Structure formats: structure tokens, C-alpha cells
Image: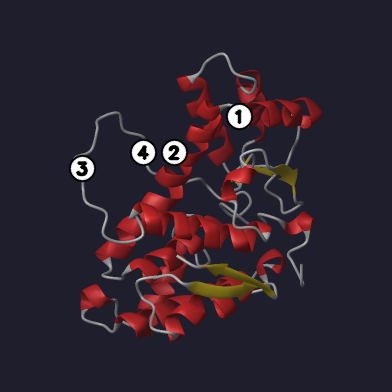
Amino acid sequence: MAIALPASLALAGVGQAAGAPHATAPRTSAAAPAVKATGLDDPKKKEIAMQIVASAENSDLNWRDYYKYLEDIKDGRGYTGGIIGFCSGTGDMLELVELYTKNKPDNPLAKFLPALRKVNGSDSHAGLGAPFEKAWEKAAQDRVFQQAQESERDRVYFDPAVKQGKADGVGTLGQFAYYDAIVMHGPGDSKYSFGGIRKTAMSKAKTPAQGGDEKKYISAFLDARKKAMQSEEAHSDTSRVDTAQRVFLNAGNLGLEPPLKWKVYGESFEIKK
């Protein structure tokens, strides 16, 4: 690999900023009416989105290989794990294990719920450590845990990004830009969270829903996103914007249509169809 992301930075910064309150979408039990996918929520486009994010997070398109991922990357968020980098210090890992335990009470991670509640909001490993790491690896082989990871990814990150993108009138590429930003910076309204980035972009260009030009607005969003990334050392390499999303935008590929070619950290990737 050429200039691949170091393993110690894999999944760096996924989720919320350390110590930030965790604002997530509520879980609902009622089935929502079926709505035809028209953007990034189209199954084929969603798969493309997962692959592009994986290229940036793990220098790999095979995102399903990372259910078992678990590491402390020393970013103040405690453990980072799973397909979207759930963090023990920001609440989303706790919510994931709670969902897993709800769906399968007798599971390897259930006994760590008290410890996860205690360390939430910190980078502590108290009550976790090697036994937790082994339990996570075992749980990752369980399809129920894999489904819980996908469900929480969608509830907390993917679905809100797509919903906001559609409300703002941006197409598939714009929705992807939103998703990638909310994955790294977390939901919320602080300056460098997803909400803050969007607010900065809207101060520079109108959204299509406001009558603005889609390409100009997405460009403004990517500019704001770069500034947010550069505000934190772990995110200072902005190639996932410069040589990936910006490439698609400059090509006018607002629908994120394959074939797609891009680079992250100097490494080339391609989705042919």
C-alpha cells in the first residue's frame, strides 16, 4: 500500500468528539411505511457509500471485515470498535451493546454493560480491558451482533444524514458528503460537529432547497468539512475530501454513479459497477 493510513489511526475520529454529549435518533418500535429509495439509501448506492468510507477508515473496501475491529486509538474516546467506530467514551458503543442484549440477552458482551455505563464520557478502560476485547471478538462472529452494528449505524448516522440531505435538496453525492461528515464528527450543533459544518456551509452558499446551486453548495460544505478536520490532529489529512469527494464533485457526478476512481492517503481505489 502506498501511504496507507497507519493501523493505529484506523477508524480515527469516528463518532463524536471526546466528552461530547451523545445526541442520537430515538429508537422506535413501530414499522415505518415503505418509502422508495431515491438517493444514497438505494441499496446499491448505500453499498458504495460503505465502501468509500471503509477506504478512508481502513484502506480497504471490504467494510464487513470490521465487525470485529476494536482498539483504543488514544483519541480520548476510549475504545473504538465495529464497522463505524462505536466509542466507549461517547455513548454509541453503550447503545450498541444495549441493543444487542435486548435482541439476545445471553451474549458475550452483556456482562460489560455496567462498566460501559461507568466509562461513558471518558477514555477509561475500567471494568473492560482484555476480557472485554475477547468478548467483542467472540460477539463479532454472531450475526445478531453484526445486525445490531448495522442497525445502530443506520439509526445514528446513515439515516439522519440521508434525511437531512434530501431535505436540503442535495442528491446522492451530497448525501454521502453528509454521511461521511457525521460519521467522523458526530451529530450535534457545535462548530465542528455535522450541524456546525452544515451551518458554516449554508452561510457561504444556499442549499438547493433554498434555490441555490447544488454543486456550489456541496463545494461549500466540503470546504467547511476540511476546516473541521484540520482542527484536530487525528483528522488533519483531508484526502478523503480532496482526492475522493471533491474528485466526484468536480466531475459533476452528483449521483455518485460508478465507475468511480479516487485516492485516500495516496492509495488508489476503484468501484467499477
Q: Nearer the viewer, residue 270 or 37?
A: 270
Instruction: Determine whether, in the image, residue 260 is placed left or right of residue 29.
Output: right
Give whichever of discs 3 and 2 has the lower sequence position.
3
Residue ID for mark 4: 26
Q: Tell me where residue 252 appears, x and y as whole percent.
A: 38, 83
Q: Look at discs 1 and 3 and give the one toward the viewer.
A: 3
* Residue 125 sits in quarter: top right
Which structural element holds mark 1?
Answer: helix
Q: Earlier in the sequence, mark 1 or mark 2?
A: 1
Q: Amino acid at mark 1?
A: Arg
Residue 108 falls left or right of residue 203: right
Q: How many marks?
A: 4
- Location of residue 85 with respect to 27 vertically, above or below: below
Residue with the mark numbered 1: 117
Secondary element at tag 4: loop
Residue type at tag 4: Pro
Name the residue that disc number 2 marks.
Answer: 151
Identified by mark 2, the residue type is Ser
- Mark 3 Cα within 10 Å, few/some/many (few <14, many 20+)? few
Q: Residues within 10 Å of mark 4 (few under 14, many from 20)?
A: few
Spatial distance from mark 1 to mark 2, Cα to Cα? 20 Å
Which residue was labeled with disc 3? Answer: 34
Badge 1 local density, few (<14 within 10 Å), some, or many (20+)? some
Label 4 or label 1, whichever comes before in sequence order = 4
* Residue 195 appears in the figure: no
User: CA separation, marks 3 and 2?
Assistant: 17 Å
User: Which mark is on residue 214?
Assistant: none
Mark toward the start of the polypeptide (2 vs 4): 4
User: Looking at the image, is mark 4 or mark 3 nearer the viewer?
Assistant: 3
Cβ–Cβ under 8 Å for marks 4 and 1 = no
